[in-house]
Image (tube, rainbow, N blue to C red):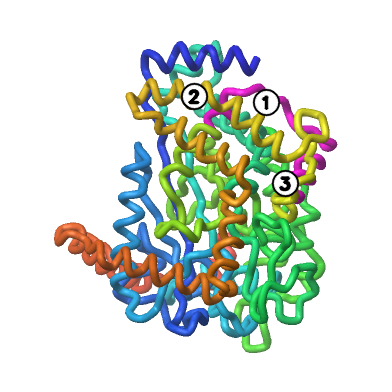
Amino acid sequence: MGESRRALFQQFAAKDWAGFRKGLEKEGLRVDRNGFIAQTPHPEALGSALTHSQITTDYSEALLELITPVCNSTEELLTSLRNTHRFVQSRLGDEVLWSPSMPCRLDGDPSIRIAEYGSSNSGRLRHVYRRGLAVRYGRMMQSIAGVHYNFSLPDHFWESWQQLLGDTRSLQDFKSEQYFWLIRNFRRRSWLLMLLFGASPALDASFVNGVSHRLNRFSEDTWFGDAATSLRMGDLGYHNNAQSSLDICFNELRTYTDTLYRAIHTPWPPYEKIGLKNGQGEHLQINTNVLQIENEYYSAMRPKRSTERGEKPIQALKSRGVEYVEVRCLDLDPFEPLGIGAQQVDFLDVFLLDCLLSDSEVIGDAECERLDGSYKDVVSQGRQDDLKICFNGKHTLVRDAALQTLDRLSELASLLDGLNGAERVYEKALEAQRQAIFQPGLIRSGRVMAAMQEAGEGHLAWSMAQSRKHQAMLREDALDADTEAAFVEMAADSIAEQDTLEKNDHMTFDDYLQAYLRA
């Protein structure tokens, strides 16, 4: 079946290939001149974090999130992200935007200020949700940054693809089924992304003060995982006991939304013990269930649908189906000023398209357990020479499994280059990753460790130097007057929109929250 899908794609693409649709959401901490997490409010010059479409905050007031619109090419995508970075960097004063995923110097939970979004009900809901994350998991985990890659194919592709496969369902149902087809294969192969692009093998000692861990000492202020690729995606990063009890099924849209819905409506005794409000009547969390909302569930990939104001993600998926998929497991690349580069984006496109074009059986419980095990092993030990993972039903050296996977992408990369009239863009992206497998020092996590060792600097000093270098590059490359003016206008408009929301709120927050939970 996999080969027949590839053959069908080749026939279709030769006549009518319109390319990929792509977007990025890139996080990064604001850091003061001493490498400590910024204690200042979200800069007013950047606009409203609640209503700005391209510049917001994630968990903390210091954790910026820069968002691109949906783009049709890698060049357009990175130009958009670069412009936003240039505007932001010009408004940070003596603060810097932190380049790595693992955070700067922290001083426990109190040093991580929960993001504020104003006095409107929608803004307060965002804040209370983040307070819930704080009381459930602590704030330290929420200081970690990453980059999310949004991938989709245009409706024109899906219409033709549906005809080629002889499918008679509605286009909405067909698209959703096909995106879950892709997701199942992504789950089988996501370990490769952690091997190639995991870039957080070390962290500042302040992150693990008082925490039991098995890391090795690099220097007085730095710990590292001996063969780790991504501490961000390991037990010290996005991990918690309550969610480990979930059994979210990624086989199809119905099972995914049903199991996620169940988690949002299932009480969890430790959260019930915390309660909804503190002694001063302040809200501590949205509810006391396993998940407050869908976004609380941490996963390497999410099926997504753009939501309307006040609409929940599950409601959007159920009513209008999957619109795109979001790759969430990517560390920031600390060697790239934007946190991600063109070759990585191009590789992701080939990788994800192949997930769609390959055979994709439903994942059973036994396979699910094996996949989770392989993923965790690569996260914690990916640079270990003799590491083996379960690959195509056999225990295989991770290096050999990676090369076999890259080899199967070669034909597709060549096809895409031919369709685009490009100068081996996709083949070069593939070759760069192949070279990294042959030379482990080129793998992101290996490069980070080598760079720190060569500089004789720990995580804080080396990361600060990278961050300042990137800031200088982006500030020297100033925006043209029209683009600058457009960003200034967006910032002002977002502040005005937040002000309007706050003035037009006529419902108490308690009533608003109850209406939201009932919806």
| 310 or 38, nearer to the observer | 38
Q: Residue at x 55, y 46 (%)?
A: 327
Q: Label 1: which residue?
A: 360
Residue of label 2? 171
Q: Mark 1 and mark 2: span between their CA atoms?
A: 20 Å
Discs 3, 2 touching: Cβ within 8 Å: no
Q: Is residue 242 left or right of residue 447?
A: right
The part of the image, by quadrant, that contains residue 118 is bottom left
Q: Quadrant of residue 395?
A: top right
Dot 3 crowding, Cα within 10 Å, few <14, some 14–19, many 20+: many
Q: Residue 493: image x %, image y %? A: 26, 65
Q: Residue furthest left?
A: 481
The region drawn magenta spans 352-378
Q: Residue at x 17, y 59 (%)?
A: 480
Q: Position of residue 156 (x, y in %)?
A: 39, 23
The CA distance from mark 3 to mark 2 is 33 Å
